[in-house]
Image (spheres, grey):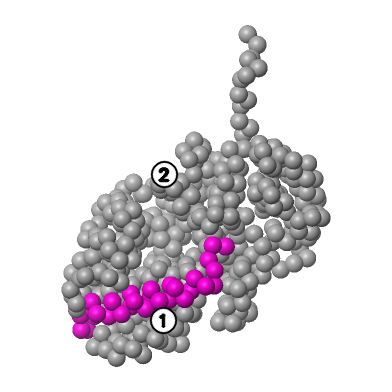
Amino acid sequence: MPPSRFAVPAEVPGLAARRIAADILDGVLHKHRTLDDQLDGAGAHPGLKSLADRDRALMRRLVSTILRKLGTLGHLLSRLLDRGVPTDAPRAQSALLIGAAQILWMDVPDHAAVDLSVRLVQSDRRAAKYAGLVNAVLRRCAREGQGLIDEISPQTLDLPQWMLARWNAHYGEATARDMALALGHEPSLDLTVKSDAPQWASRLHGEILPTGTVRTLLQGSVTMLPGFAEGQWWVQDAAAALPVRLFGDIKDKRVADLCAAPGGKTAQLALAGAQVTAVDRSPARVARLRDNLTRLALQAETVVADAAEWPAEAASFDAILVDAPCTSTGTIRRHPDVAWLRQEGDIAALTALQKRLLHKAANLLKPGGTLVYCTCSLEPEEGEHAIAALLASESGLRRAPVETSEVAGLDDIITADGDLRTLPSHLPNADPRLGGLDGFYAARLVKS
């Protein structure tokens, strides 16, 4: 029997992944939605449910590669387009970015990258008229693209200029360039294990970092890896695992974890034997924190509240962790959308919140207690400057400098004042995928 002329044609392999990638890119670049919001939870793209694991991984890699190389791609397309990227059809822009990224940095045949990008614009009413343009530009990209990139310094293009200028001023141009270069590489998967790190490093084909974190290049769904369902480890960047170490022995001590979700540091505190109260203002994030603790078979009291306004009893905790909301510029290697969603003006509002949280923590801390403040930001206002201001206004607090022995001998991550400051370029490796750290700041204070 001949097929019906009304039959729906079969989906071209790989097209769905690219269509969803285009939607998510549009969400980041034009609607200011985070990747986390579009990939997980209630706000996730509805098409993700029907994607096979392989296509889901391809989609994620496409999006992250484009966001890491966005400045370079913009420069390249401006060289290949006489009249610039079409502004009346976002799907045409997305198709050009997706095609060029595959041609230049991914293991996709050029002809497939071009063909699927053309199909992407053909399936969009506003963009269809640009199918010929997309075809021509991407074919030219395959011929000339690498040569055009070799003429420039991509690491200076792939960050917003305001951000790069700030890093140049604070860290020096050479360090800022190394940081930008490190952000251009897809990072490894870092895991904090509950026990027996050598066994898990072997089972997960990884290595143990000096700090005890297991680092692996395994790809795919984290939930399918050995040990996940059994609660033997959790995902946590090696730098993010350092601030809790600054408390020392906290067994049986009352510890408050302010702004705690999604709970990696809460889990560390609980594993160390502390009586933890984890506070976060987001009900959804607290629910996720509870789920994580259940999987890990760890205990903590959870509270849904604005930590800065939390009506807890004064001077009631032996130790307090303030993992403060911040611009998150230190996490760009794992969350490349942050570079393009944050604005320099965001810093002032966040530093005001950080100040409130620090003064609240100082009030909740017992005499002789320890306060650890940390942010995953590379901006000094959210780190060094915040602690300097606190010490100037709270005479009952003093800094307790971090010792090299507390951070596995990594003396280059300790500042002259004795605080912790990790950079994306720290912990280098011959394989750049196995090197680097998130950018973190942490200071340890003691109440007299």
**Horizontal and vertical percent position of residue 246:** 33, 76
**In the image, which disc is placed on residue 152?**
none
Q: Nearer the viewer, residue 394 or 213?
A: 394
Tell whether position 351 is magenta: yes
Residue 232 visible to an observer of this rendering: no
Of labels 2 and 1, the one closer to you:
1
The residue at which mark 1 appears reads as: 386
Residue 346 visible to an observer of this rendering: yes
**Mark 1 and mark 2 in contact (Cβ < 8 Å)?**
no
Relative to 27, 211 lies left or right: left
Earlier in the chain: of badge 2 and badge 1, it is 2
Which residue type does callout 2 highlight?
Met
Relative to 148, 407 lies left or right: left
The residue stretch that appears in magenta: 340-369
Which residue type does callout 1 highlight?
Ala
Relative to 437, 11 lies left or right: right
In the figure, residue 159 lies in which quadrant? Answer: bottom right
Q: Nearer the viewer, residue 85 or 300?
A: 85
Quick one: label 1, few (<14), some, or many (20+) residues within 10 Å? Answer: some
Compute the Cα span from label 2 to label 1. Answer: 41 Å
The residue at which mark 2 appears reads as: 224
Q: Residue at x 48, y 49 (%)?
A: 38
